[in-house]
Image: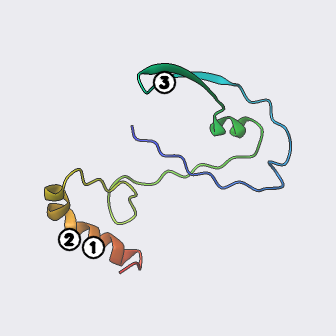
Amino acid sequence: MFNTNTFILDAAAIDQPFELTWFAVTKTIDEREAVQFERLMGQLTAFLPSYFLRVGRDGLDGRFQPAKDPEELAQRRDQIRAILRARGVL
């Protein structure tokens, strides 16, 4: 499963306090342990009307176009160009 979040929010809808949970995240910074407290944007879906869009992984409408190294990019160049042409980028 691959998941990428893209949020589009109405500024008026989020101009209010929300009871979001704090999460403690342990990280290593300069070889020292640190704790960072974070809130998760996805929790807003519990308070606001939310809509989800599933975007295909492959094909001309797919969003996931990985190229891990120059050789893979070279192999996929024609496919990537076709996708960009279909979207009107090229």
> Could you tell me the amino acid type at mark 3?
Lys
| Label located before the other in sequence (2 or 3) | 3
Give coordinates of residue 38: x percent, y percent. Answer: 63, 30
Is there a contact, CB below 8 Å, between mark 1 and mark 2? yes
Rendered position, 44 above or below 67: above
Which residue occupies the extreme right position in the image?
A: 16
Q: What is the crowding at mark 3: few (fewer than 14 residues within 10 Å), some, or many (at least 20)?
A: few
Name the quarter where the N terminus is drawn.
Answer: top left
Name the residue beneath numbered marker 3.
Answer: 27
Which label was assigned to residue 78?
Answer: 2
Label 3, label 1: how many angstroms apart (C-alpha)?
39 Å
- Viewer-proximal residue among 31 and 52: 31
Distance Cα–Cα, label 2 vs label 3:
40 Å
Residue identified by numbered label 1: 81
Q: In this view, does 63 lie to the left or right of 48?
A: left
Picture quadrant of residue 83? bottom left
Dot in front, 2 or 3: 3
Kind of residue sitting beneath label 2: Asp
Q: Which residue is found at the position 73% from the left and 35% from the top?
A: 46
Q: Mark 1: which amino acid?
A: Arg
| 58 lies left or right of 50 | left
Q: Position of residue 21 (x, y in %)?
A: 71, 25
Distance, label 1 to label 2, CA atoms, is 5 Å
